[in-house]
Image: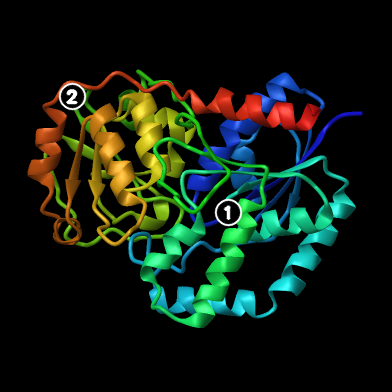
Amino acid sequence: MPFHLFVDISSHGFGHLAQTAPVLNALRARLPDLILTIRSGLPQARLAQRIAGTFTHLPQASDFGLSMKNAIDVDVRDSLARYQALHADWEAQVQAYARQIADSQADLLLANVSYLALAAARAAGVPALALCSLNWLDILSPYAPASPQLDKLFAQMLDAYNSATAFLRLTPGMPMPRIKNKIAIGPIASRGSAQPGLHARLGLAPATRLILVAMGGIPLRLPDTWPALPGYCWIVPRAAALPRADMVALESIGLPFIDILASCDAVLTKSAYGAFVEASACGTPVLYVERPDWPEQPCLVEWLAQHNQAQGISRAQFAQGSFGAALGALLQRPRATPVAPSGIDQAADFIQKQLQY
């Protein structure tokens, strides 16, 4: 009988998919008959861009992470209200999801990084693993005021995370001192191939600097103050682009995102695991918008400084378009040696052993 893996992938942006997909693809290479059920609020087409082979998609979001005003700014009030609403009928939520897991007859659940999924797997009697660089307890709690109601909520979150057989904590990752079952593994990222013909494909002079703007899966329109830099071309998601001759819609190029990332002179992004580690796996320099309030930022920035050429800019610099000098200085540095995504095989080894146990 083939093994059946039930996978829950957060739809808080695209980073959780970027962490999970390489592991699923590695598992499929080892276990060609592996059955995958994927529960995620991400569209099936987006999942299929990263996950090889067939899978059953359950289009349901088990977590929302944090409510965002845009790709960078957290909506703290709405986030707290949504968590309180979720936990108001916590047991009912757990039992409903548990029935879905039981009905699937899955052998193992993998969550990135829904604690509801882990609690439901325990209720269904199905072993479970977590895989991520963060957890929602350590992301949410720094924003929250002290209150007995929130203390109870946090206790339920922690209990769910600690119920997993293991929490495979990616590098770079948050310290997670309250997570007792964590196992540190290496970085996880897809690796792209530089496309030598990209300039010709875009009708650009060979010396043109290509800068990919990748702010994650949460929409953010570029500010009208965006700098026009001679000799530069910005590759931007269509929904974020400005009507300018120096901007090309990412979707119009017809290449995988990861190959475009590997082909660019730099990527402009926010501090986030997927962008930092995928760029480092390609050796692509990173100009990033700092998020001082984002609890995951310190560990990400520290790791990035050790493994890639990178430069932070402030939120004000981004909004005012005054980052041309910082970008130019970044591009003067020699490119770093690409990082090996050693966490892929480490995670696949661990999951395979759990499936075959």
User: In the drawing, does residue 60 fall left or right of residue 99?
Assistant: left
Q: Is residue 199 above or below residue 228?
A: above
Quarter that holds the N terminus: top right
In what element is the residue under mark 1?
loop
Residue 211 visible in the picture:
no
Pick the residue in front: 164 or 113. Answer: 164
Residue 163, label in figure: none
Residue 352 rendering spot, x and y as whole percentages: 71, 27
Residue 28 visible in the picture:
yes
User: In the drawing, does residue 13 fall left or right of residue 24?
Assistant: left
- Residue 93 location, quadrant: bottom right
The numbered mark, 1 or 2, whose residue comes first in the sequence reads: 1
Q: Is residue 120 above or below residue 127?
A: below
Three-letter residue code for mark 1: Ser
Residue 339 rendering spot, x and y as whole percentages: 37, 23
Q: Which residue is mark 2?
A: 207
Q: Are marks 1 and 2 in contact (CB under 8 Å)?
A: no
Residue 163 rendering spot, x and y as whole percentages: 67, 52
Pick the residue in front: 336 or 345. Answer: 345
Q: Disc count in the image?
A: 2
- Residue 221 location, quadrant: bottom left
Three-letter residue code for mark 2: Ala
Q: Which residue is mark 1?
A: 10
User: In the drawing, does residue 287 fall left or right of residue 357?
Assistant: left
Query: Which residue appears at 66% of the width and 48% of the height?
Result: 164
Quarter that holds the C terminus: top right
Q: CA distance from mark 1 to mark 2?
A: 39 Å
Query: Which residue appears at 58% of the width and 39% of the height?
Result: 20
Camera-near label (1 vs 2) is: 1
Residue 345 rendering spot, x and y as whole percentages: 57, 23
